[in-house]
Image (cartoon, rainbow, N blue to C red):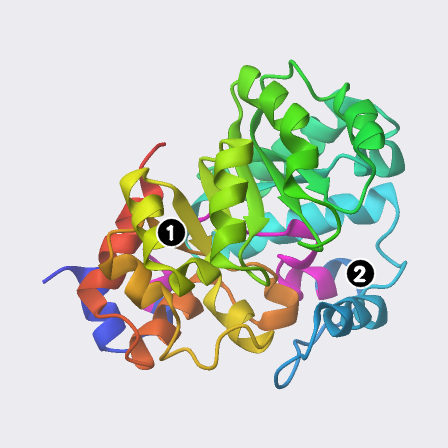
């Protein structure tokens, strides 16, 4: 019997945490270790209790708990360090995180080498065994011209692995980002975007087709349309899913009924990830255990998903 399967069946979270796993959907500002942040800053950050009713409530939590206290270059580096510490404690061996393009000027003096160094130094000093996949982040509400200006500093830098679009899914049409994603493809980046957390199955398919995505962050609304599910399976579009976040934001009624089960059993490429650990108390090992304890997926299925997430793409 596989030891990871046994750890799940024994409901042994400490043992689950000792096995290698990936975290491919982690927003590092909210993705770090509470203990590390408390030790480094004296700030205690507690997760939410109960479900939130909207993204506005999540942003309000963010303002109340982080506010402006982390909006300095020094504190930004502490948040990065906290994420590597959390990932290391959780047995994560492949971690995909990165900075929003606007953060280059805000926290790193508009110096791309300084930004890259902040992540690679933290990785080297805190979690040298973790494979860092550095990501370029785009906020969907920002004007396209502004994003293109910011991106001029990122293009051509071999340190970056992927690009991701996040924020309000309805801020502007997905088609507006085609030029950016065409350039990102030319740069050899893996193409990702947040879609299908709040929108429809059709939104998921349109985003994949318009931006030529390799991966979708969330994508759970695809389950609403069998044809979209088949499309994702046929073209091996990976969905990087965050179950606790989906439940606590009211996008899914319960862990037991999470659509990851039907997506996985329909041969869609899925991974299990943390999203915003500080808000949702959702490190990757807990996600696996919660999915098992709820009866959503079998231990053998969860181990298959874990191993799939570690494979190079």
| Towards the viewer: 70 or 242 | 242
Asked if marks 1 and 2 touch (Cβ < 8 Å), the reply is: no
Location of residue 218 in the rendering, given as x and y in whole percent from the top left corner: 50, 56
- Res 143 quadrant in image: top right
The residue tagged with tag 2: helix, strand or loop? helix
| Number of other residues with Cα within 10 Å of mark 1, as a class: few under 14, some 14 to 19, many 20 or more | some
Location of residue 44 in the rendering, given as x and y in whole percent from the top left corner: 75, 72
- Point out the tag, 1 or 2, that comes first from the N-terminus: 2
For residue 41, the mark is 2
Q: What residue is disc 1 on?
A: 228
| Towards the viewer: 233 or 167 | 233
Q: Is residue 54 left or right of residue 11?
A: right
- The boundaries of the magenta stretch are 15-38
Location of residue 51 in the rendering, given as x and y in whole percent from the top left corner: 62, 82
- Res 182 quadrant in image: top right
Could you tell me which quadrant the N terminus lies in? Answer: bottom left
Identify the residue at image location x=84%, y=55%: 70
Identify the residue at image location x=52%, y=43%: 206
Q: Is residue 163 left or right of residue 224?
A: right
Q: Is residue 114 left or right of residue 282?
A: right
Identify the residue at image location x=68%, y=17%: 155
Can residue 130 be seen by looking at this rendering?
no
Q: Is residue 89 above or below residue 232?
A: below
| Towards the viewer: 33 or 309 | 309
Could you tell me which quadrant the C terminus lies in? Answer: top left
| Label 1 – label 2 distance at C-alpha | 46 Å
Circle nearer the viewer, 1 or 2: 1
* Residue 307 lies within the magenta run: no
């Amino acid at each position: 019997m596989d030891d990871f399967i046994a750890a799940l069946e024994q409901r042994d979270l400490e043992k689950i945490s000792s096995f290698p796993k990936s975290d491919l959907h982690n927003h590092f500002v909210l993705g770090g270790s509470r203990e590390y942040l408390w030790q480094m800053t004296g700030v205690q950050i507690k997760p939410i209790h109960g479900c939130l009713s909207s993204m506005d409530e999540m942003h309000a939590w963010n303002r109340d708990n982080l506010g402006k206290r982390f909006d300095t270059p020094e504190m930004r580096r502490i948040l990065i360090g906290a994420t590597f510490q959390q990932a290391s404690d959780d047995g994560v061996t492949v971690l995909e995180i990165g900075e929003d393009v606007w953060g280059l000027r805000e926290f790193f003096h508009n110096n791309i080498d300084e930004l890259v160094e902040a992540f690679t130094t933290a990785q080297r000093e805190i979690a040298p065994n973790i494979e860092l996949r550095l990501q370029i982040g785009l906020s969907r509400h920002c004007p396209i011209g502004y994003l293109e200006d910011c991106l001029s500093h990122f293009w051509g830098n071999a340190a970056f692995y992927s690009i991701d679009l996040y924020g309000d899914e309805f801020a502007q049409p997905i088609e507006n980002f085609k030029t950016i994603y065409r350039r990102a493809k030319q740069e050899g980046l893996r193409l990702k975007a947040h879609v299908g957390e709040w929108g429809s199955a059709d939104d998921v398919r349109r985003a994949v087709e318009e931006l030529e995505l390799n991966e979708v962050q969330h994508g759970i609304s695809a389950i609403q349309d069998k044809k979209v599910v088949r499309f994702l399976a046929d073209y091996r579009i990976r969905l990087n899913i965050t179950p606790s976040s989906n439940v606590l934001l009211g996008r899914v009624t319960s862990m037991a009924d999470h659509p990851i089960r039907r997506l996985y059993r329909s041969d869609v490429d899925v991974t299990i990830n943390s999203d915003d650990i500080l808000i949702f108390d959702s490190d990757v090992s807990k996600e696996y255990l919660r999915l098992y304890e709820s009866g959503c997926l079998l231990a053998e299925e969860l181990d298959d998903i874990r191993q799939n997430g570690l494979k190079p793409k």
